[in-house]
Structure formats: C-alpha cells, structure tokens
Image (cartoon, rainbow, N blue to C red):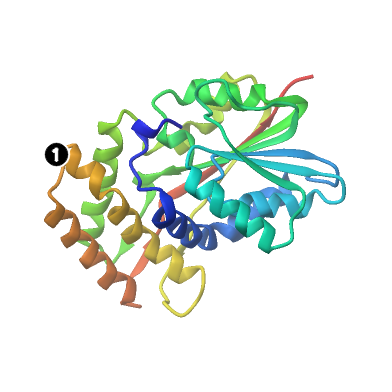
Amino acid sequence: MTAGSYIIRGGVEGRERLRVMSRALRGDTTALLGRLGLRPGMRCLDAGCGGGDVTLELAGRVVPGGHVMGVDLDETKLDLARVEADRCGFDNVTYQYADVTNGSLPSGFDLVYARFVLTHLPQPETAARRLVDSLLPGGICAVEDIDVSGAFCYPESRAYNAALDLYSATARDRGVDPDIGRRLPQLLADAGCEDIVASISQPAGLRTDVTGEADAKLIMALTIEAITDAAVQAGIATPDEVHAITDELYVLVEDERTFMSMPRVVQAWGTRPF
C-alpha cells in the first residue's frame, strides 16, 4: 500500500491496535488457513504483514522446511515483528520492506496471503495482479478484506453509525474502498486466478471478560481513534467530534447489553494457473 492512501496511524500504536484485531480475527483466519492445504516445506508471503501475527501462524504450519516472508511499508512494525519472531523462537521467518503497488514484491511462493491490504489501495486491481504474479504456477492467493457497510450494533447506536460513516468518508476521501470485501472474488479472477472460493466471517461480541468477544467490540473505538488525523485533515470532522464518537464507543464496549460487530470480512482465495 502507499503511505498516502493509508488512513490509520501506524508505528507502535498501530501495532497494538493490530494485536487486538488479530485476537478478534484469529479463529476465522486460522479456519481459512486450515482450508488452504498448507504443508511442510511451502514458501509463503504475508503481504502487508503489519506486526506479523499471521506471519507466525503461517510459519508454524509449514515446518519443517518451509519459510515465510512478511513484507510491509511500516518499518516500526517490521522491527517489532522481528523481535516477536525471535522471542517466540521462529527461525523460518524473515521480514522486509516492500510495497505491493510498485513491483518490488519478491516471487516464487506457494502461497501469498494479504489481510486488510487491498482496502487501503487506490488501485487494488494492480496490487491483486502483483500478489498473483508472486506465486509459482499452481500457487494459492488468499485475501481477507472488509465490508464496512456490513457492520452492526444492537441496540442501534448513533455513535456507532457515526463511526461507520466517518470511517467510510475518510477512506473514500483518500480514494480507497471501505467495502472492498465484496469485490475480492472478481479482483482475484481479473488477476488471473482460477477455482476461486469465497466465504464471509464477522467477529462480534457482548461480553467484556471473554478474549475475542471483548476485542471484537473494542476494535471500532481503536480504529476511529487511529483515523483522527486523516479525518481532520480531510475536513470531515474536528478532533472534538472524533473524540466524542470514540468516547461513546468505549461506553458501548463496556455495556454487556450491547452486541457489537467488526466490519464484515470476506475471505477469498484462488489458484494461479499452471
């Protein structure tokens, strides 16, 4: 992705937000990985790897003999990911700086995976082709991405609806698609994939004392906080307006009568032809 189109703060704060999100998504993402036929010895690319949560999940599934490379634009997240991989004892993982939009991706992989990358790109079609081009013939391209319009809160909340509108408006101001999830099968097809499969997942929660549920409720507040700079720069909201929305979201997070979801997530994967 390009730094200019990315609306969410990165660095250490961004890494911690991704950690919460990864906990909320872990069950659905590991279920997807389980359907992809990962096996020992495979070479995998995690494009837009962030802090490396899925990178390490992949690495554990391709031993012995396999290797996983994580690439990202955020050097701070990459440094943190390297430290975490070392701490967890993974010796089959490497991280490097790369941009999925400019042709700098390495190639020769059995699996290329990207989560919440295409939604941040003004030209996702180009990036999808680069992901597929990084595969060996017969390799699998798997992507997960958001459909913000599919998110929900019950009972209905003005703050939650305002958060969805704010996120979508800020994304579209940068020329990117907050509802790109529904386009994933077609993007893969246009990039040259065959045998495309798609499914939907959507973490949601009520309780604050259950890991996963609590994280699914929390991620909206963290995300709106993280787009404050972009929303203000675009003239979509003032800092005080964004803070008011996030304050109300945190109240909803703590209210166990409130059932909140993350955006709907579309999972799609296909094969590069021989």
Q: In this view, does 30 lie above or below 145?
A: below
Q: Is residue 195 above or below residue 36?
A: above
Please state the horizontal and vertical placement of residue 147, each as a whole percent of the image: 41, 43
Position of 223 with respect to 156 (left or right) is: right
Q: In which quarter of the image is residue 272?
A: top right
Toward the bottom, the furthest residue is 209
Please state the horizontal and vertical placement of residue 45, each as a whole percent of the image: 67, 37
* Local SS, label 1: loop
Please state the horizontal and vertical placement of residue 188, each as a whole percent of the image: 58, 27
> Relative to the observer, which residue lies in front, 59 or 202?
59
Please state the horizontal and vertical placement of residue 6, each as a whole percent of the image: 37, 37
Q: Quadrant of residue 260?
A: bottom left
Position of 174 with respect to 35 (left or right) is: left
Q: Quadrant of the C terminus?
A: top right
Q: How many labels does the image show?
A: 1
Disc 1 target residue: 235
Label 1 is placed on what type of residue? Gly
Q: Name the residue located 24 percent from the left edge and 39 percent from the top edge.
A: 169
Position of 93 with respect to 172 (left or right) is: right
Q: Name the residue located 41 percent from the left edge and 77 percent from the top edge.
A: 208
Q: Name the residue located 64 percent from the left edge and 25 percent from the top edge.
A: 132
Label 1 neighbour load within 10 Å: few <14, some 14-19, many 20+: few
